[in-house]
Amino acid sequence: MIMDINQIREYLPHRYPFLLVDRVMEITIGESIVAYKNVSINEPFFNGHFPHHPIMPGVLIIEAMAQACGILGFKTVNKMPADGYVYYLVGSDNVRFKRPVMPGDQLRLEANVIKGKRGIWKFACRATVGDELACEAEIICAERKIA
């Protein structure tokens, strides 16, 4: 199932400049997701990170993976932000950065469900550029009803 940016915006409450998923290429409900972030020199963080050698901050790579996890979580439980729900990034374990992500890169975001119980989800995540691993992590998200 492919999701374009308009469909993604229905499942993520994030907006520019913090929406970090551009397209979903594959999703298997309750199991896995493959999404993409197109990294452009126009990203606001490149002004300061670093002006003469721009690289995407690692925390934003983690956030992009977490946003992909949020889409998978919402689709799995058949809920949406419009229903009053949000997925919070509540933890990350075993985070490793293997290569810098730079303008012009297409960041492939992969997440596989490790387990889900009572609204707490743990995912095995990878972010790659081409065949190269950029980051891997276990990400924990929590589903919450907001007022």
Image: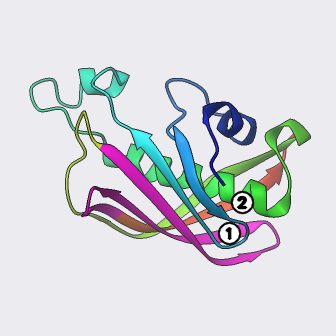
Q: Residues within 10 Å of mark 1 (few under 14, many from 20)?
A: many
| Left or right: 127, with 28 as reference point | left
Residue at image position (53%, 65%) is 111
Q: Where residue 87 appears, x then y in whole percent? A: 70, 51
SS at circle 2? helix
**Magenta span covers which residues?**
106-135
Residue at image position (80%, 40%) is 81
| Left or right: 91, with 93 as reference point | right
Label placed on residue 121:
1
The answer to whether residue 114 is magenta is yes
Identify the residue position indicated by label 2 in the image: 73
Label placed on residue 107:
none
Amino acid at pointer 1: Trp
Residue at image position (57%, 49%) is 24
> Mainly helix, strand or loop, the magenta region?
strand
Which is nearer the eye, 27 or 61?
27
Q: Where residue 2 appears, x then y in whole percent? A: 62, 49
Are dots 1 and 2 in contact, CB under 8 Å? yes
Disc 1 or 2, which lies upstream in sequence? 2
SS at circle 1? strand
- Name the image quarter holding residue 75: bottom right
The answer to whether residue 111 is magenta is yes
Amino acid at pointer 2: Gly
Q: Where residue 125 appears, x then y in whole percent? A: 47, 66
